[in-house]
Amino acid sequence: MEKLTLIEIAQATGGKILFGNDDVTCESVVMDSRKVTENALFIGIKGEQVDGNDYFLTAFEQGATIALIEKDVDVIPTGQKGLVWVPSTRDALAALAKYYKNRSLTNTRFIAITGSVGKTTAKDMLCGMLSAKYKVFKTRGNYNNELGLPLMIFSMDSSYDFAVLEMGMSSLGEIHFLADIVRPDLALITNIGTSHIEILKTRENILKAKLEITDFFGPDQVLFLNADDPYLAGIKHQTYQIVTAGIATGIYRAKNISLEPGTIEFDALRGEETLGHIKLEVPGMHNVANGILCFACAHQLGISAADLTRMTIDRTVMRLEETQFEHLTVINDAYNASPESAKAGLDTLALRGGRKVALMGDMKELGDYSAKAHVEVGAYARSRVDVLIAVGDFAKEYGEGFGSQDFHGYPTYEDAVIALPNLLDEGDLVYLKASRSMKFERFLSVLERI
C-alpha cells in the first residue's frame, strides 16, 4: 500500500477529524486490532458479536497511527495519532478503497471474476496465465465481499499491471456494490448454478445478480462468458463487448481434451484457428471450461499458448487440495459446496484408481431445494465412488440417493470421527466436501492418524 494522509482519509470518507495533524499517515489498513502493524489505519467494524469501534485505543497501542470509527466517544488526543468519525465505517471502507484505487492504481487494469462455481480456481488460473508476461495481483483466500475486497485493493501498490479480483455474493445488489468500488476493465462469469438459491429463489435471479459485475461497463469493457452454460449462452449487449468460450460452443473452444488425475490438456481454438496446446496443473473436466475461459481473457491481453508452457498455478487451499498421509490419500475440497461443485469433484475423483471414499457434509443455502439436491448428489456419487460417508442434517438424503450398500450416515462430526477408523482401509482415496460452516477440514487431523 502507498501512504494515505489523515486529511485524505477524512475527505474521501466524508468523515470528521476528532484529533490529529493533517500530515499523519498510514501504510496499511486493518479491521482486527489483533492484526495491527506499525503505521496502520484501523477501521472499527461492528460485527454480530464484537464491535470493533471499541478497540481503537488498543489499535493505537499496537502501533496504528489512524483510526476510523462510527461510534460517538469522548476522547483525549493520543500522541502523534489521528482519529476520524464517520456515519458508517462500512461505507467509509468502500469509499476509501475507491479513492485509493483512483489515486494510486491508475496504471493497473482490473479483472473481476464471479460465478456460482469455480471462480476461485479461475482466478488462480488467470493469474498464472497473465503472470507469464505481467506483474499480477490476485484476491487472497476468500477476501471477495464488501469487507474483504477493499482490503485487497489496499494491499496493492502502483507496480501491478493487472489485478484479478474475485467477487462473491449471496443476494442482489452485492456485486453491484463491489463493481462500483473496482470499476473493472474486464470481467469473467464462470457459470450460473444453485448456490444461494435459498435467498435468490431462481437461477434467473442468480444470473441477474452475477451480471451486476457489468453495471459500470462501457464500450471499452469486455465480458467473458462460459458459452456452454445455458443461462449465459444467450446473453447479448450493445453497451459493452462480449467474448464467449467453451467446450461445445463459443468464440474460443477447447478440443482434443485429455484428463489425468492432476492435470488437464486441450487444444485452444479461436474460431477454426488452432492457437496451441495448453496443459494446466488442475484436475477435472469442469476446469477445462474454466481453463478455456481464462485463456480467452489472457489471449485478448497478449498471452499466447506458447507463453504458458512454463506457467505455474498458485492454487488456493481446500480446492481439490491433495495430501498424502501414511495410510491414506486425501483430496480436500471442503472450502465450500454446492450441487454443481460436488458433482464436479466426484467426476474428478472418478478418474483415480483404487478404492474411493467420499466423506460429504451438508450443502447450505439451498432452501426448498435442499433435500432434493442431497438426494441427487448421493445418486451421482453411486457410480463414482465405492463408499459414501455422509455427515450432518442431510445424511439421510445422501443415503436415499446413494443406496444402502456401502453407505454410512452420521448426524454429527463427533459420531463420524468415532466410526471412521472402522470404515477406511489402508490405501483409500478420501474426498472431503461440504459447505464452509461444516468445517470439514477438521477431519484432516483425524484421517492423518488412521
Image (cartoon, helix red, strand yellow):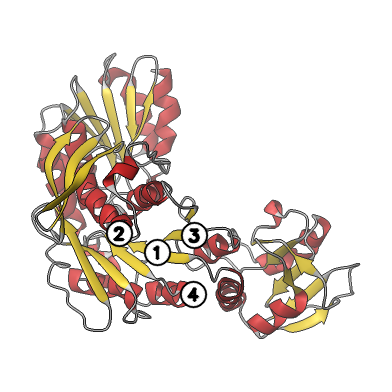
On residue 161, the disc is: 3
Q: Closer to the camera, 31 or 363?
A: 31
Q: In this view, does 189 lie to the left or right of 401?
A: right
Q: Name the residue type under label 3.
A: Asp
The residue indicated by pointer 2 is: 297
Residue at coordinates 62% horizontally, 68% vertically from top-left? Answer: 45
Distance of label 3 from label 4 (alpha carbons)? 18 Å
Neighbour tally class for label 1: few under 14, some 14-19, many 20 plus, Cα within 10 Å: many
Neighbour tally class for label 3: few under 14, some 14-19, many 20 plus, Cα within 10 Å: some
Q: Earlier in the sequence, mark 1 or mark 2?
A: 1
Neighbour tally class for label 4: few under 14, some 14-19, many 20 plus, Cα within 10 Å: many
Q: Earlier in the sequence, mark 2 or mark 3?
A: 3
Distance of label 2 from label 3 (alpha carbons)? 15 Å
Distance of label 1 from label 3 (alpha carbons)? 11 Å
User: Eyeballing the image, is 189 above or below 256?
Assistant: below
Residue 30 figure quarter: bottom right
CB of mark 4 within 8 Å of CB of mark 1?
no
Q: Residue 29: x, y in percent?
A: 66, 62
The residue indicated by pointer 4 is: 181
CB of mark 1 within 8 Å of CB of mark 3?
no
User: Eyeballing the image, is 119 above or below 259?
Assistant: below
Q: Earlier in the sequence, mark 4 or mark 2?
A: 4
CB of mark 1 within 8 Å of CB of mark 2?
yes
Residue at coordinates 13% horizontally, 67% vertically from top-left? Answer: 233
Residue 387 visible in this rendered orientation of the protein: yes
The residue indicated by pointer 1 is: 111
Q: In this view, does 40 lie to the left or right of 278?
A: right
Q: Name the residue type under label 4.
A: Ile
